[in-house]
Amino acid sequence: MIQIPKGCKDVLPSQAYLWQYLEQKARETADMYAFREVRTPVFEHTELFARGVGDTTDIVNKEMYTFLDKGGRSVTLRPEGTAGVARAFIEHGLAGGVLPFKAYYLISAFRYERPQAGRLREFHQFGCELYGAAGASADAEVISLADAFLKRLGLKKVELQLNSIGCKHCRARYHQALREYFAPHLSELCEDCRVRYEKNPMRMLDCKVEGCKTVAANAPHMLDYLCEDCRAHFEEVKRLLSAAGVAFTVNPSIVRGLDYYSRTVFEFVSDAAGAQGTVLAGGRYDTLLEQMDSKPVPAVGFAAGMERLLLVMEAEGCLPIAPQGVACYLAGMDASSREKAFLLAQQLRAAGIPCETDLMERSVKAQFKYADKTGARFVAVLGERELEEGAAQVKDLRNSSSERVNFGELADYIKGRS
Ligand code: ATP
Ligand code: MG
């Protein structure tokens, strides 16, 4: 038997309402902030991610699903959403259009990782992107959108952690300080971190290997190296968030796993669902578009991991209840009443009433059982006598009461009661 690839998950019809709920809450929140949906391809030229995500990141070095297509081009299943949106923004010349550009996406993303709870190979993200605004109000807007989304889901125990990782000017001094700090510990670090030491020392703070984490715990903080402008920007972000009632704590060890971040970085973290605690993460990336050969355009955004959100929602008791079955099940007894049930169902649907009828040639008793199991509200029974009278016997499964209802009045009867 062929099985699902490792690290992937099916969403069966009985569970799909959870995803629809989550997506609906995302769309509702984005609407409130006037972010519009953007859809980009599932795969892109590999070069886009190498440049956009950064070639010192775990994503590019270890986690990408890359293959040659039949034309011999190297393509990659998107490991995240930002690079594709940035490409589209540049390719369609949107910097010359209405700014700020505000877009959101609901996507699946692909990373070759070791599967565990909250860590999959195909996973899903809700992400937002805001391009064109350099000021702290844009950071505060995007963070408050993220906060509003989590609140709309009913989550209460997710904590916002905030940091600034400065700009390329102040970061140069910080990199030097980091190298000085890590130099005597190089032999205790993992192989990756020794490469990071040379290429991008800040990445060492994001290492998940225990030994490296221990060393990194006492490393100097970027916050102590911020230049005047970056400091003022960070202060303003914090001030606006406080004024808006968005609670946060400053966590100097957040650096994020992607190369394109500058200044503000943030994570919404929960301890409700085990080890994979970061449910939503983002920041400012003012150099990303430049990195992709566009003129510089400041940008800020985030991505939320949907699987992790569902785990945390379950832990916090915020999952929605399963939807009801159809408003009306039409049960037929013999050939002609079954046909009438089939036709009445069409009429009820035309009147906007979800309904179904037997497709399995079952007995009336078995049809009732089915209607009950699937959570139907009413069952309209049709037999020889009902056809003669032009009326169905309608049973309300909630209270077992039963009434005769003319075929012509059936739609109104059900509408009035469900
Ligand atoms: P982590 O440190 O947990 O690996 P990351 O820094 O790689 O996360 P991002 O690239 O910032 O994650 O992605 C944003 C969000 O997407 C994460 O905060 C997380 O909720 C989710 N996410 C990332 N990778 C996975 C994965 N493999 N499976 C499920 N969700 C994921
Ligand atoms: Mg990761």
Image (cartoon, grey):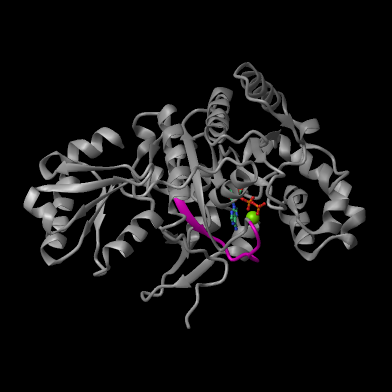
Query: What's the residue at 79%, 60% (across, down)?
Result: 194
Q: Is residue 406 left or right of residue 191?
A: left
Work out which quarter of the rendered image holds the C terminus and state it.
top left
Q: Residue furthest right?
A: 184
Q: Is residue 199 left or right of residue 89?
A: right
Q: Is residue 22 above or below residue 166?
A: below
The reply to whether the magenta stretch includes residue 111 is yes
Q: Quadrant of residue 270?
A: top right
Q: Is residue 170 left or right of residue 303?
A: right
Q: Quadrant of residue 73?
A: bottom left
Q: Is residue 98 above or below residue 393?
A: above
Residue 260 visible, this orientation: no
Q: Quadrant of residue 365?
A: bottom left
Residue 92 visible, this orientation: yes
Residue 68 lies, in percent from the top left, at: 44, 73
Residue range highlighted in magenta: 107-117
Query: What's the residue at 8%, 48% (across, down)?
Result: 389
Q: Residue furthest front?
A: 385
Residue 245 lies, in percent from the top left, at: 62, 20
Residue 243 lies, in percent from the top left, at: 63, 16
**Front residue of 263 and 139:** 139
Residue 156 lies, in percent from the top left, at: 64, 33
Q: How many marks are shown on the rendered structure?
A: 0
Look at the magenta stretch and give its main secondary structure: loop
Query: What's the residue at 40%, 75% (across, down)?
Result: 72
Q: Residue furthest top?
A: 243
The reply to whether the magenta stretch includes residue 229 is no
**Front residue of 177 and 233:** 233
**Front residue of 87 and 339:** 339
